[in-house]
C-alpha cells in the first residue's frame, strides 16, 4: 500500500450528540439494540469505546463526552466543541456557504456529488470545517473546527478556501487563530487540487506568522495525512486531546508496509508528546483554561528591544521557525 | 504500448514508473555542471532517497534538490525506492536554506511514490517535516523551479514541490494518492487502479488544465528513456526560460507571487441557495 495524504483512515463509532433534547429522549426510550451479552438502549445509554462501560448519555454530555470511568474522550460535534471552548453566544460563523464544486466530476463506486449530498444531509453543514469568530474567556479569536462526520473531515478545495479566508479575517482583525483538527487528510475526490490545499493552507499560516499573530493548533482524534502534514503541524503551540491518533500515514498503511502489528499506543497523543512532536496534552475539562493562559501570553504587548527591526518586512520570521 | 500519443492515464502511470526512466541524478549530470553533493542534513541518519547539492546551471551557481530512486533492487534498497524519511526532507531544507543565505536559485526534481510510511518516519515527525518544508519554501527569498520528472506522490512530493514555476514532463504523474491506494479505498478493490488513475486526473495534461502546473515538457516519442539527451535538453531549456525572468524579481515580490499562485488553486462554489 503506497503512502498518501488522502483518505479516511478509521471507522470509529460516533457518539450520538444531537438527539439529547428531552423530546427526543422521551421518544427514544425503549429503542434497544441487542448485543451478544447485554441489551443497551441505543440513545439513552452510550457504550464507551474504550472501557465498554455503558454510560447514561445525559451524564456523558454533561461531562463533555469524556468517559467518567476511563477518561476516554469521545469525538464531539462542532456544536459541542463551540460550547466547550467559546464564551456563550460569541460564535459568529463565516463563509458557511462555501461548498465543493466537484472539479474532477469524480466517480468511484458512487459519485462524489452524491457523497457530498449525503454528508450535507447527515451533518447539516456544507463542508468538513466550520469557521468563524468568537471569544474564549473574553479573548477574541478566529476559530476553525473540523467535522469528522463530514466525509472524515477531509480537506478539499472548499475546506482550504475557508481556512485561507479565516486567516484573512484573523489578520484583518488582529486575532489569534485556533484550529481544532479532526481529519483523515486530503480529500481524494478532488485529486491533486486537494493536495494543493496543503500548500494553500500552510501558506496562510506563513502569512499569519509574518504578522506575528499566534496559531494554536489543537489535534483531536484522528488527525492524519495531508492535514497533519500541512497547517496542523505548524502551530506556534500544538495541543492534543488525550488518546488522539495523530500521524502522517494511517496505522493500517504502516502495518501493511512494515508487515508487523504496531505497538499499543503508537501514534497516540501521549506517544507524540514523548517524541517531542507536540507541546502538550490537554483534557477536555482543562482545555479552555489552558487556552486562556496561552492567549494571555500571546496577547500581551510585544517587547521591543531598542535595536529591533520593525515588523514590516518580517525578514527574520523564516529563520525564527 | 505501441504508440505514445494516446496513452491512458494508467499507461502513463506505468511509464512514469518505468525502470529505465531517467532519474534525478541523470538530470543533474546532464543539465548541470560541477555538481557537489551535500549529504549532511545534520540529522541522524543520512537519507539517500533525497539528493541535494551545489551545481552550475548555464554557468551560474544554483542549488539542486530532488528525490532519488534506484535503477535496480540493490540501488532501490539504498535509495528506499525514493521514499524519504523526515531527515530527507530536513536535509533538503538545510541545503535550500544555504541557497537562501547565498542568494542562489533552487531547482527541485520530483520523483517519489510518496513519503515513507514506516514507524521510524512517524516517530521522527514525517508530517511535521513535510509541513515545515512547505512553509519554509514559501519564505525562501530566491527563485524556485520545480520539475516533476516521474512520480509526484502526494505530500511526499509537495514537500519539495513548492515553487515559482512548476514544470512537468509529459508522462510524469502527480496525485493526492496512488491509483492503487485510491482504488482500494474508494472502490474497495485494488484491481480498479486503472479506473482510479483515470478518475484522479493525474497526468501532466490534466494538471495543466487544472492550473496546478505552469508548463508541460513534451517527451520524445516512446518516453523520456528512449532519448534521454533530447529530454534533458528540453528540461534544461524549460528551466532556463522560467528562471530568467524570476531572477529579476525582488524577494518580496517572489513571496507575494508564490502566495497568489497557490491561493488560486482549488475549485468551489459560493452559491447562496
Ligand atoms: Zn470508558
Image (cartoon, coloured by chain):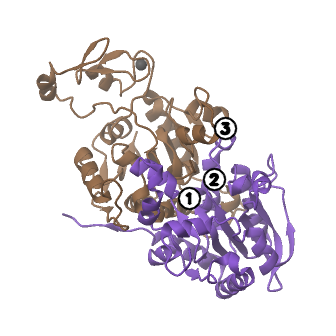
Chain colours: A brown, B purple
Q: Chain of mark 1?
A: B
Residue A279 in the image: state x and y as whole percent: 60, 38
Left or right of B1: which side holds A125? left
Question: In the rendered view of the protein, which quadrant contains the C terminus of chain A?
Answer: bottom right
The answer to whether residue A146 shows anywhere in this view is no
- Which element type, helix, strand or loop, lies under badge 3? loop
Q: Chain of mark 2?
A: B
Q: Using the image, tell me which numbered label, if any, was put on residue B154.
A: 1
Proximity of marks 3 and 1: CB atoms separated by less than 8 Å: no
> Dot 1, how many residues are within 10 Å of its Cα: few (below 14), some (14-19), or many (20+)?
many
Disc 2 + disc 1, Cβ < 8 Å:
yes
Q: Crowding near pointer 3: few (<14 within 10 Å), some, many (20+)?
A: few
Identify the residue at image location x=56%, y=33%.
A269
Tell me the distance, in whole angstroms, between the alpha carbons under discs 3 and 1: 25 Å
Q: Nearer the viewer, residue A162 or B165?
A: B165
Res. B115 mark: 2
Is the CB of mark 1 within 8 Å of ligand 1? no
Q: Which mark is residue A276?
A: 3
What is the CA distance from the residue labelled 3 to the residue labelled 2?
Answer: 20 Å
Q: Secondary structure at mark 2?
A: loop
Q: Tell me the SS state at disc 1.
A: helix
What is the x, y in percent for residue B117? 62, 46
Residue in the foreground of this view, choosing between B152 and A40: B152
Ligand 1 positioned in quadrant: top left
Front position among marks 3 and 1: 1
Chain containing the residue with disc 3: A
User: For the point 53% across and 55% down, which residue is it?
Assistant: A213
Foreground disc of the pair 3, 2: 2
The picture places residue B143, in percent across and down from the top left corner, at 67, 77
Amino acid at each position: 500500500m503506497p503512502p498518501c495524504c488522502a483518505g479516511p483512515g478509521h471507522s470509529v463509532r460516533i457518539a450520538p450528540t444531537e438527539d439529547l433534547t428531552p423530546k427526543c429522549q422521551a421518544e427514544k426510550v425503549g429503542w434497544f439494540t441487542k448485543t451478544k451479552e447485554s441489551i443497551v438502549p441505543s440513545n439513552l445509554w452510550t457504550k464507551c469505546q474504550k472501557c465498554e462501560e455503558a454510560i447514561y448519555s445525559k451524564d456523558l454530555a454533561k461531562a463533555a463526552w469524556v468517559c467518567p470511568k476511563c477518561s476516554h474522550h469521545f469525538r464531539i460535534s462542532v456544536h459541542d466543541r463551540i460550547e466547550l471552548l467559546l464564551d456563550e453566544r460569541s460564535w459568529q460563523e463565516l463563509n458557511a456557504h462555501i461548498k465543493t464544486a466537484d472539479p474532477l466530476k469524480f466517480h468511484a463506486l458512487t459519485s462524489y456529488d452524491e457523497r457530498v449530498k449525503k454528508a450535507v444531509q447527515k451533518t447539516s453543514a456544507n463542508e468538513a470545517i466550520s469557521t468563524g469568530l468568537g471569544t474564549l474567556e473574553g479573548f477574541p479569536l478566529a476559530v476553525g473546527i473540523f467535522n469528522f462526520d463530514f466525509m472524515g473531515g477531509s480537506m478539499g478545495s472548499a475546506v482550504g478556501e475557508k481556512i485561507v479566508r479565516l486567516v484573512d479575517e484573523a489578520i484583518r482583525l488582529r486575532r489569534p487563530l485556533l484550529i481544532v483538527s479532526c481529519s483523515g487528510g486530503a480529500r481524494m475526490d478532488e485529486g491533486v487540487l486537494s493536495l494543493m490545499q496543503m500548500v494553500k493552507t500552510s501558506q496562510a499560516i506563513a502569512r499569519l506568522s509574518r504578522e506575528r499573530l499566534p496559531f494554536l493548533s489543537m489535534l483531536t482524534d484522528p488527525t492524519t495525512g495531508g492535514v497533519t502534514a500541512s497547517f496542523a503541524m505548524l502551530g506556534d503551540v500544538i495541543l492534543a486531546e488525550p488518546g488522539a491518533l495523530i500521524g502522517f500515514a494511517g496505522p493500517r498503511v504502516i502495518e501493511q508496509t512494515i508487515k508487523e502489528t504496531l505497538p499499543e499506543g503508537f501514534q497516540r497523543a501521549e506517544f507524540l508528546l514523548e517524541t517531542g512532536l507536540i507541546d502538550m496534552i490537554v483534557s477536555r475539562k482543562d482545555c479552555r483554561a489552558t487556552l486562556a493562559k496561552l492567549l494571555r501570553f500571546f496577547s500581551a504587548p510585544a517587547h521591543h528591544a531598542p535595536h529591533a527591526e520593525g515588523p514590516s518586512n518580517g525578514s527574520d520570521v523564516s529563520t525564527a521557525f | 504500448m505501441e504508440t505514445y500519443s494516446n496513452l491512458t492515464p494508467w499507461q502513463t502511470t506505468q511509464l512514469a514508473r518505468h525502470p529505465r526512466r531517467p532519474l534525478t541524478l541523470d538530470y543533474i549530470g546532464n543539465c548541470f555542471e560541477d555538481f557537489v553533493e551535500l549529504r549532511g542534513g545534520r540529522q541522524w541518519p543520512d537519507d539517500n532517497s533525497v539528493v541535494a547539492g551545489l551545481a552550475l546551471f548555464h554557468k551560474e551557481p544554483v542549488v539542486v534538490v530532488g528525490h532519488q530512486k534506484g535503477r535496480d533492487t540493490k540501488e532501490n534498497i539504498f535509495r528506499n525506492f525514493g521514499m524519504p524519511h523526515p531527515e530527507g526532507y530536513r536535509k533538503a531544507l538545510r541545503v535550500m536554506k544555504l541557497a537562501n543565505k547565498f542568494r542562489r536559485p533552487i531547482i527541485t526534481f520530483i520523483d517519489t511514490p510518496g513519503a515513507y510510511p514506516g514507524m521510524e518516519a512517524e516517530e521522527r515527525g514525517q508530517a511535521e517535516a513535510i509541513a515545515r518544508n512547505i512553509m519554509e519554501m514559501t519564505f525562501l527569498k530566491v527563485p524556485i523551479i520545480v520539475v516533476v520528472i516521474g512520480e509526484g506522490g502526494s505530500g511526499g512530493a509537495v514537500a519539495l514541490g513548492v515553487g515559482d514555476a512548476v514544470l512537468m514532463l509529459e508522462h510524469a504523474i502527480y496525485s493526492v494518492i496512488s491509483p492503487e491506494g485510491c482504488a482500494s479505498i474508494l472502490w474497495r478493490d485494488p484491481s480498479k487502479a486503472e479506473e482510479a488513475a483515470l478518475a484522479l486526473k493525474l497526468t501532466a495534461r490534466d494538471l495543466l488544465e487544472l492550473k496546478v502546473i505552469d508548463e508541460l515538457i513534451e517527451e520524445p516519442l516512446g518516453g523520456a528513456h528512449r532519448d534521454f539527451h533530447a529530454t534533458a535538453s528540453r528540461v534544461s531549456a524549460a528551466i532556463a526560460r522560467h528562471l530568467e525572468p524570476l531572477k529579476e524579481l525582488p524577494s518580496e515580490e517572489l513571496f507575494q507571487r508564490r502566495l497568489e499562485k497557490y491561493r488560486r488553486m482549488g475549485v468551489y462554489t459560493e452559491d447562496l441557495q
